[in-house]
Amino acid sequence: MTLLLAACGDKPGDAPATGGASMTKEEVKAAVDKVQLKPGQWEGRFTVQDIDLSNMPGAPAGMKDQMKSMMSQTSLKYCVTPEEAANPSGEMFSGQENKDCTYQGFAVRGGSVKGQVSCKADGGTMQASMSGTYGQEAYSMDMDMKMAGGPNGAAMAMKARSEGKWIGPDCTKAE
């Protein structure tokens, strides 16, 4: 389920929001607690829709297609326990605990979710915005990520989609 929102905002294609009040991890978790999922076996998919390497000097030909292929998953099965379904963790939407990340605009209501996250690492920054829909038996999320500050000023942008659906009450071993 971490893939669901490894990155977070508004409509794909919009630049991630800057400014505004930051949210704590606890505030993100409070928003996420409104999501009620059905426990059992889920199947998810993460698909990279587009990668922009135009600001990455020296990127070899074919790198874009290779990255899209490597980062996209055809299918991933996972189990959501009754405890996880009743009380989704903040990590579901905000990713792993990272003191170098800030969160903004997380809102979960009426079957819609949106938010932004900004992280700093190794001299670079990653800003991501996401928006999507969720229900007890399905979710879909569009993500727009922008990374800057790589070696030699390298930067890239990526649009991706994460989708999942409940496939049954009984969990099986990962495939």
Image: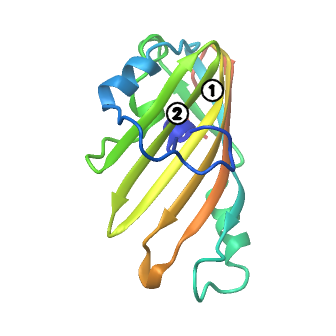
Query: What x and y, as percent, mark residue 58?
Result: 59, 89
Outermost residue toward the left? 99
Left or right of 100 in this view: 145? right
> Quick check: 47 above or below 9?
below
Q: Which of the numbered marks, if any, corresponds to residue 42?
A: 1
Specify whether 10 is left or right of 31.
right
Residue 155 location (% of width, % of height):
53, 72
Q: Amino acid at mark 1?
A: Trp
Position in image of residue 99 (x %, y %): 25, 46
Tell whether label 2 touches label 1 (CB within 8 Å).
yes
Disc 2 residue crowd, few under 14, some 14–19, many 20+, Cα 10 Å: many
Residue 66 visible? The answer is yes
Judging from the image, what secondary structure is the residue with disc 1 in? strand
Residue drawn at 42 percent across, 72 percent down: 149
Residue 46 seen in this snapshot: no
Total numbered badges shown on the rendered structure: 2
Q: Which is more N-terminal, label 2 or label 1?
A: 2
In the image, residue 157 sits, relative to residue 128, either above or below, namely: below
Residue 43 against residue 154 in the figure, above or below: above
**Residue at 52% of width from left, 33% of height from top?**
1
Q: Nearer the viewer, residue 92 or 108?
A: 108
CA gap between label 1 and label 2 equals: 9 Å
Q: Which mark is residue 1?
A: 2
The colour scheme is rainbow
Mark 2: amino acid = Met
In the image: residue 98, left or right of residue 90: left
Taking the image as shown, residue 44 lies to the left or right of residue 88, namely right
Q: Quadrant of residue 170?
A: top right
Task: Give the percent coordinates (x, y) of residue 53.
Answer: 64, 74
Residue drawn 51% across and 78% down? 154
Task: Determine which quarter of the picture holds residue 104.
Answer: top left
